[in-house]
Amino acid sequence: MIAGAHASHQLRRPWGLHAGLLLVAIAILFAATAAEWDLGVLFDRSERAHALARMGEWLSAFASPDFSTLFLSQAWELTQQTLAAAIIGSLLAVLFGFLLALGATRSVTVPAEASGWRARLSPLALFCALCRLLQDVLRAVPDFVWAVILVALIGLGPATGALAIALNMSGILAKVYSELWDSVEARASEPVRATGAGRLATFFYCVRPLAARNTLSFTLMRFECAVRNAAVIGAVGGGGLGAEVLYQIQFGAWDKVSTLILFTLLLTLSVDLASNALRRQWREDPNHPRAGGVSRAIGRSYVGLAGVLAAGGWALAFMGERLLPLWELVSGEAWGKLAFFERLLRPDLSADLLLRALGSAIDPLAMAVFGTFFGVLGAVVLGYSHSYAFQAEPQRFTGEAVGPAIRSVRLSLLVLTRILALVCRGIPEVMWVLLFIAFFGPGLLAGTLAIGLHSMGLLLRVFSESVDNQPYRRFEQGFMGSRLTLFATVAAPVSARDWLTYGFFQFESNVRMAVVLGLVGVGGLGFQFSFHFEWFRFEQASTYLLVMIGLTVAIDRLSRWLKLSRVGC
């Protein structure tokens, strides 16, 4: 029976994959035809000349940053606020996301022997579905919307930004954690279950360790995103760099804006280096060439854990009294203020408004489809040069002996590609879109390019890590004289399921970001929500908010149904 079930699964798997690829093609065709693309600046000579002039003015304004002692001190203080808010928000998100993911993981909540419609309607299955719905809502509402609501509850400041990040990131982590845990094949846990261990024991002693490297990699990547989001959230009341950037832009102080952007990039670089150090400390495969054995791997894990605890302690100490507004939520004082947004709970469900809201979703969907496509394509093309294994350590699985000159060329290629990826993901999409608006003007093209560049930077990181996390013996067995051929024929195929998961998840994230970009001139769903919200039309704003949530839930359920979001561990 087990063999038959396994064979049946193998027959179904290609259908889901092929259906998913067909849907991608349909989505690209839909995005190209349904949305209104203004490409005149690419083909009209006069428009292109004006665009180049605008770009020159924009760049020249950033050529002389403000490096005065007073402003540098202020920027440093704001940078620390941003980092502290991101750390606290991420730690809360890991805690809440882990607990929520436990409930959303079928292998933990639903007995393995359960089957049929009775199992799908059992209390445990319904609890699993409820947890998945909660994580959908948490991540479907962009963190800037959470920040707007929290500002009314606990006021302006970095505490608002930290909690907004925690709410949105909890849903994101819960989704990925649960899918990574569910993707661990049942036969891998059979030895543990044979000892009489229950579902929780099997999870902690088998499933979680097998998925640990991928969950760690994604958690650290989301922390980097949290640092960038902490700055963006500042523009709607979350404190930190974002609030000051918005303030200086309003006064046209581009020298100060360029200084703040430089601090954002330096912060991103520092977080990137720190997360790389944690990855090395927490690499849990003692057989990996860089692990150094079981005892050393355990010691490095404790060092990494100590670093996380130290960062959390610093963030709490730095924030100090700034976290006092959170006590209003714990004590219940803040909940009375929610009555101001009570009308958000009564959406306008008239047919006319619903049709307009659904129509406004076309623009963010089109930007997300093409932005993700370009991001995935760029990450696949540059993944070879971004891989540490293929550029810095190929001799471990190829057996080749190369001279210092060739090794220097390879390391230079690795460094340059990683710098490119860092810049692409280090600058938030909102900053990218402002740059492209200066060149192309407001519209879908600027938003698509911003999403595509940022997605490429993010996906390059996780795509190459999926390759680098593979045991080198797989590469050694498939090597036939060319590293590039080995990457294309072995490394890419064995990492493809991971890439598929990250690509579809990035698309979902890009849909939310496309909504956010509507606030800065690209139109669509985000613009309509903001317009109605600012004019106190909360019932209409709630309708657009429901469409945001509906988009995320629909994408998630479709990817789960087609088994497109399963990653091999």
Image: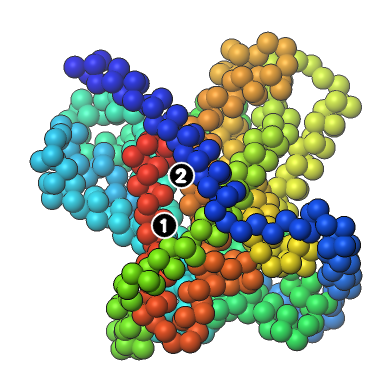
Front label number (2 vs 1): 1
Residue 453 location, x and y as percent? 68, 51
Residue 303 location, x and y as percent? 54, 48
Residue 113, placed above or below residue 125? above
Identified at 20% across, 42% down, the residue is 110
Q: Is residue 313 left or right of residue 484?
A: left
What amino acid type is highlighted by mark number 2? Thr
Identified at 42% across, 60% down, the residue is 139
Q: Which picture quadrant has residue 228? A: bottom right
The one of 501 and 371 positioned closer to us in this rendering: 371
Q: Is residue 563 left or right of residue 196?
A: right
Residue 292 visible, this angle: no
SS class, disc 1: helix
Q: Which picture quadrant has residue 542? A: bottom left
The one of 235 and 200 positioned closer to us in this rendering: 235
Residue highlighted by disc 1: 551
What amino acid type is highlighted by mark number 1? Leu
The one of 434 and 353 positioned closer to us in this rendering: 353
Identified at 75% across, 42% down, the residue is 417
Question: For the residue carrying disc 1, how many other residues have a C-alpha within 10 Å: few (<14), some (14-19), or many (20+)?
Answer: some
Q: Quadrant of the C terminus?
A: top left
Identified at 47% across, 63% down, the residue is 359
The one of 352 and 440 positioned closer to us in this rendering: 352
Q: Quadrant of the N terminus?
A: top left
Residue highlighted by disc 2: 215
SS class, disc 2: helix
Residue 552, placed above or below residue 360? above
Cα separation between marks 2 and 1: 25 Å
